[in-house]
């Protein structure tokens, strides 16, 4: 199994950060490999919602990476499961308030099957790269004017 996590402290309140993360349509704003995304079913950020997503794969070719939101706790947690594509990790965002700031932890895990198990090292590195993009989220949200 491959696992990676990363955390940042964002100078924004937990509800604002949660609402931004809960809407999967915001992913292209801070996840550099997302090429397209649309809400297929459900309400943005609601448990059971399904997003159709295309990411840049090896050599830049498009790869399906659709996901379903599996668990939500407003202001605190969003979990998801990738349901389409060659790799189907599961993961989540975990938020906690620290004064007027929010600590965000992004965790991903992937259980390779069959021959994919032979490339566990590259899967681990891919997950580490993915979760480290939280730094881009931090910069983006801290540049935005705070909500009043």
Image (tube, helix red, strand yellow):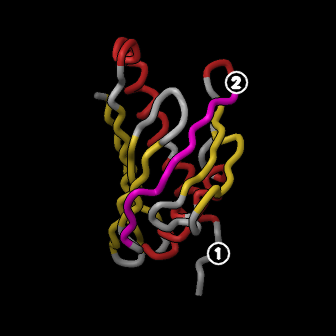
- Residue visible at 43% across and 33% down? 127
- Residue visible at 49% across and 52% down? 68
2 shown above or below 15: above
The residue identified by callout 2 is: 61
Dot 1: element = loop
The residue identified by callout 1 is: 145
- Secondary structure, magenta segment, majority class: strand
Measuring from the top left, give residue 123's x and y in whole percent. 41, 24
Measuring from the top left, give residue 130's x and y in whole percent. 49, 38
Dot 1 and dot 2 residues touching (CB under 8 Å): no
Quarter of the picture holding the N terminus: top left
115 shown above or below 50: above
- Residue visible at 47% across and 68% down? 18
- Residue visible at 60% across and 60% down? 41
Measuring from the top left, give residue 132's x and y in whole percent. 46, 41
**Residue 68 in magenta stretch:** yes
41 or 81: which is nearer to us?
41
Earlier-in-chain disc, 1 versus 2 = 2
**Residue 115 in magenta stretch:** no
Range of magenta residues? 61-73
């Amino acid at each position: 199994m491959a696992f990676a996590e990363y955390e940042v402290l964002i100078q924004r309140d937990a509800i604002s950060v949660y609402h931004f993360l809960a809407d999967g349509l915001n992913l292209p704003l801070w996840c550099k490999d997302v090429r397209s995304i649309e809400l297929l079913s459900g309400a943005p950020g609601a448990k059971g919602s399904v997003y159709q997503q295309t990411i840049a794969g090896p050599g830049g070719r498009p790869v399906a990476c659709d996901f379903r939101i599996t668990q939500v706790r407003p202001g605190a947690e969003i979990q998801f499961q990738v349901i389409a594509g060659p790799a189907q990790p599961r993961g989540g965002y975990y938020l906690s308030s620290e004064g007027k700031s929010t600590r965000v932890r992004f965790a991903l895990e992937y259980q390779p099957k069959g021959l994919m198990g032979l490339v566990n090292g590259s899967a681990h590195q891919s997950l580490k790269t993915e979760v480290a993009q939280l730094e881009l989220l931090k910069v983006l949200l801290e540049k935005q004017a705070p909500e009043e």
